[in-house]
């Protein structure tokens, strides 16, 4: 579960967005670059939301050993995974050939689900934190797709 939760770390999500963004830039797909950038900015907005809601995390060993201390609600890992893996899954479904346009989005969706589950399993979040992160992430993803007409 520790490895799975790492897939939702902001650094990992940012590197994935930057890699796909660089490829999109090379192919003059500016809308994709801007959409991914907006997804990264949305992760920052989630941090602001966490700051104002300021729900304390569960009292667990995992939380006491966390390097970065932040509030619990909504889960940033679940939110970030829903937004960036959701965007990447959508882009894969519309841009990849053959069976890849089905397999990659399914795999990314599984990643997003497992990341949220790992946060509860490890004791970093309450289930409602993760559910809120997923819901807000899916909403943000839908808005980004509509706004950038991807």
Image (tube, helix red, strand yellow):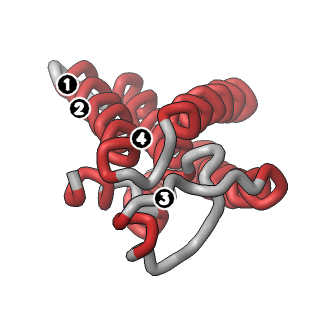
Residue 85: mark in rendering: 4
Circle 4 crowding by C-alpha within 10 Å: few under 14, some 14–19, many from 20: many
Question: Of all residues shown, which one is farthest toward the left?
Answer: 99
User: Which numbered disc, 4 or 1, marks the residue that appears first in the sequence?
Assistant: 4
In the displayed structure image, the side of residue 126 where residue 46 appears, left or right: right
On the image, the x and y values in percent for residue 23 come to 39, 57
Rounded to the nearest angstrom, the CA distance separating label 2 from label 4 is 9 Å
Circle 1 crowding by C-alpha within 10 Å: few under 14, some 14–19, many from 20: some
Residue that mark 1 sits on: 103
* Numbered disc in front, either 3 or 1: 3
Residue that mark 3 sits on: 59
Residue 132: mark in rendering: none
* Numbered disc in front, either 4 or 3: 3
Q: Which residue is drawn at 66% across and 27% down?
A: 139
On the image, the x and y values in percent for residue 95 come to 37, 30
Rounded to the nearest angstrom, the CA distance separating label 2 from label 1 is 6 Å
On the image, the x and y values in percent for residue 124 come to 44, 54
In the displayed structure image, the side of residue 58 where residue 100 appears, left or right: left
SS class of the residue under badge 1?
helix
Q: Are marks 2 and 1 in contact (CB under 8 Å)?
A: yes
């Amino acid at each position: 579960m520790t490895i799975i939760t790492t897939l939702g770390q902001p650094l990992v999500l940012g590197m994935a967005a930057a890699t796909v963004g660089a490829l999109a830039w090379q192919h003059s797909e500016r809308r994709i670059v801007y959409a991914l950038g907006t997804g990264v900015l949305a992760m920052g907005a989630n941090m602001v939301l966490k700051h104002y809601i300021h729900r304390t995390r569960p009292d667990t060993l995992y939380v006491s050993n966390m390097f970065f201390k932040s509030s619990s609600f909504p889960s940033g890992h679940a939110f970030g995974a829903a937004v960036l893996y959701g965007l990447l899954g959508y882009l894969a479904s519309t841009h990849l050939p053959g069976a890849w346009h089905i397999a990659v989005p399914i795999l990314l969706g599984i990643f997003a689900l497992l990341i949220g589950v790992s946060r509860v399993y490890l004791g970093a979040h309450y289930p409602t934190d993760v559910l809120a992160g997923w819901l807000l992430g899916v909403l943000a993803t839908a808005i980004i797709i509509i706004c950038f007409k991807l």
